[in-house]
Image (cartoon, rainbow, N blue to C red):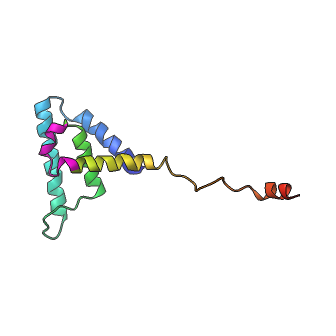
Amino acid sequence: MLLSFSYTIVVFLLNSVVIRTPSVRAQTIELLALRHEVRVLRRQRRQRKRADWRPGDRLLLAALGRCLPRREWGRFPVRPETLLRWHHALVRRKWAVFGQRRGPGRPPLPPEVRQKCAR
């Protein structure tokens, strides 16, 4: 729930701060994504072929992806399918909180009511 709330805030801030001209906007978002990728790669201690994306990293890249049309998603350090998967996971996590059930069946009756019915 907290992750989806912060995702909404990040998307709002990016949409309000990033320049509105489409060509400059795409370049600015690409620059932000690449700078974040550099931070992720510097955070890793060992040489790896793939970056270790933490939930916060995924949140930021998914939010940046919302600021661009899908045809521009080739500018990101991950594949467009990965961005979509991360975005769907954020949305699924947000709505999973509302779908939690207590368990099967009717909730148990309080002991007072059971005693009255037993008489």
Q: How many marks?
A: 0
- What is the x, y in percent for residue 71? 15, 37
- What is the x, y in percent for residue 6? 35, 46
Q: Name the one closer to the observer, 66 or 114.
A: 114
State the extent of the magenta-drawn residues as a range: 70-81
Image quadrant where residue 49 sits? bottom left
Quadrant (top left, top right, bottom left, bottom right) of the C terminus: bottom right
Rendered view: 48 above or below 29? below
Q: Residue furthest right?
A: 119
Q: Name the one closer to the observer, 88 or 61.
A: 88
- What is the x, y in percent for residue 51? 18, 61
Q: Name the one closer to the observer, 2 or 88.
A: 88
Q: Residue at x 22, y 43 (%)?
A: 64
Q: Residue furthest bottom?
A: 46
Predominant secondary structure, magenta span: helix
Q: Residue at x 44, y 49 (%)?
A: 96
Rendered view: 41 above or below 16? below
Residue 51 part of the magenta-drawn span? no
Q: Residue at x 16, y 42 (%)?
A: 73
Q: Is residue 19 left or right of residue 13?
A: left
Q: Residue furthest front?
A: 105
- What is the x, y in percent for residue 74? 12, 44
Rendered view: 43 above or below 96? below
Rendered view: 36 above or below 46? above
Q: Residue at x 15, y 71 (%)?
A: 46
Q: Name the one closer to the observer, 89 or 6.
A: 89
Q: Is residue 87 left or right of residue 21?
A: right
